[in-house]
Amino acid sequence: MTSRVRNLVKAPLRERVSAEEWDARVDLAACYRLAAHFRMTDLIYTHISARVPGPAHHFLINAFGQLWDEISASTLVKVTLEGDIVEDPTGYGFNRAGYVIHSAVHRARPDVACVMHTHTQAGIAVSAQEEGLLPLSQHAMRFWSGIAYHDYEGLALEVEEQARLVRDLGERKAMILRNHGLLVCGGSIPETFDLMYYLERACQTQIAAMAGGAKLRIPAAAVAEKTAAQFKALPYKPKRPEWKALLRMLDRTDASYKD
């Protein structure tokens, strides 16, 4: 009797996950591509994660070894809150520091669908300044009273830091990691990208204004508070017109993020 070896070929990832997970993968891959386009990368380091819809408490994060402009929906790694890999199409695994930071936020904040962490030049520069983010611009005033701060403890490799990180973040959506970079989180991937884009712009403006050497003009706290409230009440924001426009840009230039 001759035995036969049966070749088992996995179905494409898109056929093995829910429609909701695939949509999240596409949006997260788009977020990575957009962050690369706007120069918010640090080679293969730093991370953006998204909660996988459903009861399993999994999240998606970048494979450790891909540049952000080559990430696509099917290359993202699916991880449990405990750090176990559920799906890793590339076999690259994930960055330990990314797991420590992102799993902490996803575990502590069920309202958060996406977490974004960057090491940009402007973000690190502001994180190294004693006074942190100043209300020097309209972009910065959007975050008035909404910025948290977390002191630097070294590379984020130890799970013991997680408790202090989520304590410092509290219920806010934006945090400056002292001497390290920026972190934002939102109820959706588009909201998270929007927050990081404008926090990054606020940091760029602050560094540029201070580098000019002229005396800085800082608006009154009441004006900053009013501006922050106006941003929260913008009626068009929930419709995400800027996200739709950004996706159109990606589709025109390179739609492979959807693969």
Image: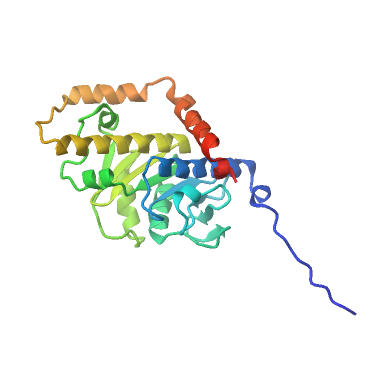
User: Would you say residue 113 is visible in this rendering?
Assistant: no
Question: Would residue 194 be found to the left or right of residue 30 on screen?
Answer: left
For this rendering, which residue is in front, 211 or 187? 211
| Placement of 185 over or under 215, stated as above or below | below
**Is residue 257 found left or right of 203 in the rendered image?**
right
Q: Residue furthest left?
A: 215
Q: Position of residue 244 (x, y in %)?
A: 50, 29
- The outermost residue toward the right is 1
Q: Position of residue 230 (x, y in %)?
A: 32, 21
One can see residue 22 in this view: yes
Q: Is residue 139 above or below residue 182?
A: above
Reply above or below: 79 against 37: below
Residue situated furthest bottom in the rendering: 1
Q: Look at 13% across and 27% down and name the residue there.
A: 217
* x 54%, y 46%: residue: 52
Task: Residue 153: give x, y in percent of width and height.
Answer: 25, 58
Residue sticking out furthest to the top = 235
Q: Residue placed at 37% from the left, 43% from the top?
A: 39
Residue 4 position by quadrant: bottom right
